[in-house]
Image (spheres, helix red, strand yellow):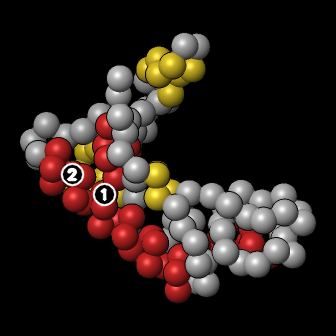
Amino acid sequence: MKGFVFTQNGWVQSFGSRYVRPPIIVGDVSRPAPMTVKESKYAVGLTNKPSTYFIICVANFQVKGMLTGPITILRWSFPRDDVSQSVQAKQLALALRDEVSDLEKAGISVIQVDGIFVSV
């Protein structure tokens, strides 16, 4: 997706001893090209099960995967401070909508988009 940059050394502790390098949103978010369609079609081709899921595949098992939802992406990123988070969330949602549409056109019939990030 456009609008993101990543650091080489910007590690942040997320859970226990798990560290991540959160993306930094630096511009308007968009999706100029499919992100997972090629890999999804390849994964489906590795199994003899019906083409109803995508991404993670082990030969002879059903393929299942997911896309991370827009709010979770936003919450796990460093957002812009010159644009409201509402606008950034909508940009992410539109980019993911386009990805889901392209997956559907590629014959992927079940697509899971993980929902809202909840912090307790």
- Is residue 14 among what the camera can see? yes
Q: At which x and y percent is residue 61?
A: 84, 63
Residue lying furthest front: 120
Other residues around mark 1 within 10 Å, as few (<14) / some (14–19) / many (≥20) = many
Residue lying furthest right: 60
- Is residue 24 among what the camera can see? no
- Name the residue located 68 percent from the left edge and 61 percent from the top edge: 64
SS category of the residue bearing label 2: helix
Q: Nearer the viewer, residue 112 or 19?
A: 112
Count of number-bearing discs: 2
Give the number of the disc on residue 92: 1
Q: Which residue is mark 2?
A: 88
* Horizontal relation, residue 91 to residue 113: left or right: left
**Type of the residue with mark 2:** Gln
> What separation in Å lies between label 1 and label 2 (alpha carbons)?
6 Å
SS category of the residue bearing label 1: helix
Q: Badges 1 and 2: C-beta atoms under 8 Å apart?
A: yes
**Type of the residue with mark 1:** Leu
